[in-house]
Image (cartoon, rainbow, N blue to C red):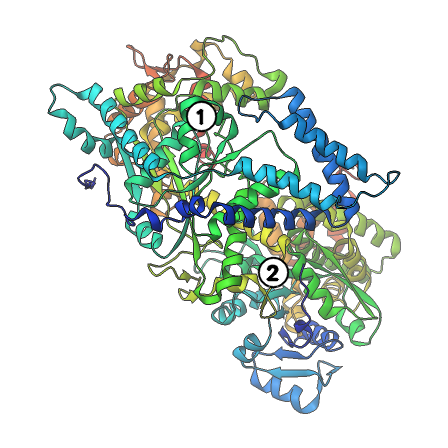
Amino acid sequence: MDSQNTSDKLPVGVIGAGVFGTAVANLLAENRDVILYSRRPEVAENILVKRIHRGQKMSERIKPTSNIEELTSSCTLIFPVVSSSGFSEMIRTFSPYLRPDHILIHGTKGLDVRLKDGEKLTEKTFLNRKMVRTMSEIILQETEVMRVGCLAGPNLASEIALGQPAASVIASRFDEVIREGQRALRSSRFQVFGNHDITGVELAGVLKNVIAIASGALSGLGYGENARALLISRGMVEMVHIGKLMGGEPKAFFGLAGVGDLIATCSSEKSRNFTVGFRLAKGEKIEDILSSMDEVAEGVNTVKVTHAFIHSAKTRAPMTETIYKCLFSGMTVKEGVDYLMNLPLGTDLDYFS
Amino acid sequence: MEEQKHTRKGWLYEPLFPDVNTWPIYKLTQERDEFLKEVKEAAFKAAKEQTKTNQGLNEELAKTYYLERIRLKTNAWAADKKDEGPFWEGVKKKLLKLSPENEKTPDLNEDNILESIIDRYTEEIAGFFSPSAYNFAKEATTFGFARLLNASEGKGISRFWKTRHNLHEKIRLQGDLDHIRTLAKKGTLVMVPTHFSNLDSIMIGWAIASLGLRPFLYGAGLNLFGIGILAFFMNKLGAYKVDRRKKNMIYLETLKAYSTIGMVRGCNSLFFPGGTRSRSGSIETKLKLGLLGTAMEAQRLNFLKDKEKATKIFVIPVVFNYNFVLEAPSLIDEHLKRTGQQHYFRENDDYSTSYKLAKFMLKFFTKSSEISISFGKCIDLFGNPVDNEGNSIGKNNEKIDISRYFMTNGAFTRDSQRDAEYTKMLGDEIVKRFHSESRVFASHAVAFVAFELIRKRYKKLDIYAVLRLPEEDQKLTYLEFTNGVSRLLDRLREMAANGEVHLYHELEIPEIDKVIETGIKNLGMYDAKRPLYKTKDDFIMSEDFNLLFFYHNRLEGYGLAKYI
C-alpha cells in the first residue's frame, strides 16, 4: 500500500464550531493546520479576533471561516461535528462542494428521521429502518462521498479542552479512513482506535444517550452507585437489543464507543443528557430544561426516535419506553423507577445466545 | 407494445465496428505474447503482495502443491492436460530443495517456482479469438434459432424469411439499447446478467451480436472445454477457461489478472456475478465479487495511466425474464437439499438431472412463449448514472470526476481494501438494479400468489412441511386466488410507478381473468407436471409443488408476501 506524506501538508477541515467541534479542532491542530467552519460569519470573525471560543483557547493553527468552498477546496479530510437536527441540512448545503476524494469523519451522535412533508414524529408514527438514518447514511445518500467514518467514544468536550488524556474510536468500512483519521487526531494525550462496524459504533454512541438521561434522573432522585450500576448494565442489554434491530453488531457495544462512552456519560454531570435527566428528576418541565440549554441534548430526540422505532418493530424496550413517558407523557421519574423495579425478572445476559 | 425494427440480416442493429481489426478481443490474440506477459506480471505482483514475505510465499506454494495433488487424485477431468502430474511433481522437488536443511541451489528460489506456476495457469486460462469462427457462430445461432422457430410455425417455405422477424418478437430485448450502443463507442462495457438457466449464455451472446456490439470477453467453465464441438468453438471465441476446482490463491490471482488486463486493453467483458445458476429461482441477492473487482482494478489502472483521458468502464445489469426454466426441477431439488438437509425428502425421482442442449432449444422454440432480456441503465463503477458522453452524473445532477475515488490527499493511491469496499457497494447497487429492471410476467405473479396463499394457510409449518402437503390440501378456490392476484397486482403497479420493478405488457391488461389465464398457461409450460392448473370445478391446484415454489421465488426479495 502506497503511503502518502503529502497528507501532512494539507489542512484538515472541521464543520461546526460547537463545544465538541471546537475541541476536535484543537486536537487536530496539534498535528495539522485546521480550517474550522461556522455557518455564522460573526462566530468565525469572533474566533479570529479573540482566539477564545466556547470557553476554549483556540490553537494558532486553526483558521475559522464561514466560506464553504474555502474549506472543501483546501481539505480532503473533513470532520463534520454539528447537532443531528442540523446535520442533514448542513450536508445538503455542503453537497455541491463535496467531491469523490473527500473523506468525511463525523462526530455527531444522533439519528435522523425522514417523514413525509408536514408529518411530525409522534408516539404513533410508523418508523422502519429505511426512515431512520444514521449520520453516515445521510452523507452516503446526499453526497458523492463514499469514504465515510464516524468518531465516537467517551469524549466529554470539557475534559478534552483541559488537555486530559482520552481515547476515541474511528469506525469506517475503509481502512484508509481509519488510517487518515488516526494520523490527523492521534497525539500523546489522545488515543484513536479503529473499528470496521460503522453502523454498530454509530448506534452505540447514539443509544447510550438515552441511558445517560436515566442516569441523570437517578442522581436527581439522590440515588447512589448501586442504582447506577444496575442502570448501566441493564441499559447495555437494551442498547444491544435495539442496536441489533437497527443493523449493528453487538460487538461494537462492548468497546470504547459503547460501554466506554456509556460509563463516561452516565457518571458525569458535565454531560448534557445527564443534566436533562437530573433536572427532570428535580421536577422541572422538559420544555424549560431544553430552552435553557445552549446546546442540544441529543438523547431527547433519540428517545423519541427509538421509542417510535421499537413500537413499529413490535418489540419492547422497557427503559426507553419509561424514559419516553417521563419526558413526554407526564410520568414522574419516581413512578418510572417504581415501574421498572416491578418488572418481572428476565435473564441477566442473553445477547450472546 | 412498440415494434422492434431489425436489420436485413435479422439483427436489431448494424454492427458498430464492422472492421474486426479494431476489436480489442481480436488484438488479444494478435498480440498474445505481450498480453500474456502482462497478465503474468500482474499475477506475480499480486501473489507476492498477498504473501508478503519469502516465508509466506513458500508456505503458499506448498499449500498450492498440496491442493493440486488432491485435485489430481480425486477430481480429474477430460479437459486436464496430460503433463499435470509430472509438473506438480517437479514443483514438489523444487520445494524440497528449498527447505532449510538442504544446501542452496543457485538460480532456484520461491520466485521462480511461483513464476512457473503462474506461467502454466496463464497458458491454461488464455483463449483465442478467431473472427471467422465468431462470424460462423453468430450466423449459426440466428440460423439455428430461426429454423427452430420455423419448425413450430412453418407452413410453406415462405415462412422461412419471416422467422428472423419473429425471433425478436419471441426474444424481446428491452431497455435503453441506443444508450448502450452510444456508450460502447465511449468506453469499455461490462455486462452482468442474472443467471437462471444454461440458456442464458447463448441468449446473451446472441443479444450482444444483435445489438451490434463487439464480442465480449467471458469466462467459461473448463469442464465445457472437454466436450468436442463445444470446445472447438469456445476455444476460438475468446472465452477464457475457468476451473472451479482450483481455489488456490495463485490461480485466482492469475484469473483475475487475465480479466483485469483484458479490460485494460479495452475488451468488453461479461460476468455472471451470481456465480452459478440461481438454485432457488429467486433473483440473486448475494454476488461473487471477485471478477467484479477486476473491473474496479482495471478502471483504477486506466485512470492511473491516462488521467482525465482514461477509458471509462460502464456496467450494464441485465435480467433474463423467463416463463419457464428448463432445469427448474433439478435446480429447486438441489436448493431444497442444500437448505433443508434432513428436513427435505425427495418423494419421487423421475426427473433426469441434465438436459441436453439440443432438446433444450427445441422445446423452447417450438412452444410459443416469450423471453425478455432487460438491459438496465448503464452505471459507472460507483453506481452513478452515465450520460451519452460517458460522464458520470452525481447526486446534484452535475458531472462528477470518479477518478478521484482512487485518490487520497490529491494523489492516486493503491489500496486493495478500499477498492474491495467499493466493489461491495457496486455489488449492492447491481442487486438493487436486478430487482428494479426485472420484468414481472403473468406467470411469475400467479405462481407467487398461489404459493403464498397456501403458505399462509399453514403458518405453523416450515417450508419443507408445506412442500410435502398432500395435493388436496394445496387446493385454492378460484375466488380467493383471484383476490390474491388482484392484491398483488395493485402492489406491483404501485412499485412499478416508483421504478422499483417493471411489469411486462401482459400485466397491463385490465381483465384479471385474462392475466390469470395467460399466467397459468405460460407457467412452466415445458415441465412434465404443471406447476399450476385450473380444475373443471374452478379450483386452482398444482401437480408439482416444488416447481411452483421455484417459480414463486422469482418474486422473492420485494417484500410482497404481506400484500397477498
- Tell me if residue B204 comes above or below residue B400 in the rendering: above
Q: Name the residue located 66 percent from the left edge and 75 percent from the top edge.
A: A18
Task: State the residue in front, B338 or B244.
Answer: B244
Quarter of the image that includes the C terminus of chain B: top left
Locate residue A352 relative to residue B204 in the image: left or right. right
Callout 1: 10 Å neighbours few (<14), some, many (20+)?
many
Name the spot of residue A312 as percent of width and height, x first: 56, 44
- Tell me if residue B65 comes above or below residue A89 in the rendering: above
Say what amino acid the circle numbered 2 marks: Val
Chain of the residue under label 2: A
Judging by the rendered image, the residue that carries numbered circle 2 is A148
Residue B376's tag is none
Name the spot of residue A11 as percent of width and height, x first: 65, 77
Snapshot quadrant of residue A186? bottom right
Chain of the residue under label 1: B
Q: Secondary structure at mark 1?
A: helix
Q: Is residue B461 visible?
A: no
Name the spot of residue B154 as percent of width and height, x first: 16, 20
- Tell me if residue B189 comes above or below residue B196 in the rendering: below
Mark 2 to mark 1 CA distance (whole Å) = 41 Å
Say what amino acid the circle numbered 1 marks: Glu
Name the spot of residue B93 as percent of width and height, x first: 76, 32
Judging by the rendered image, the residue that carries numbered circle 1 is B452
Q: Name the residue located 44 percent from the left edge and 46 percent from the top edge.
A: B28
Residue positioned most to the front: B106
Quarter of the image that includes the N terminus of chain B: top left
Q: Is residue B136 visible?
A: yes
Q: Name the residue located 47 percent from the left edge and 40 percent from the top edge.
A: B271
Task: State the residue in front, B317 or A258.
Answer: B317
Callout 2: 10 Å neighbours few (<14), some, many (20+)?
many
For the residues tagged 2 and 1, is the chain the same? no
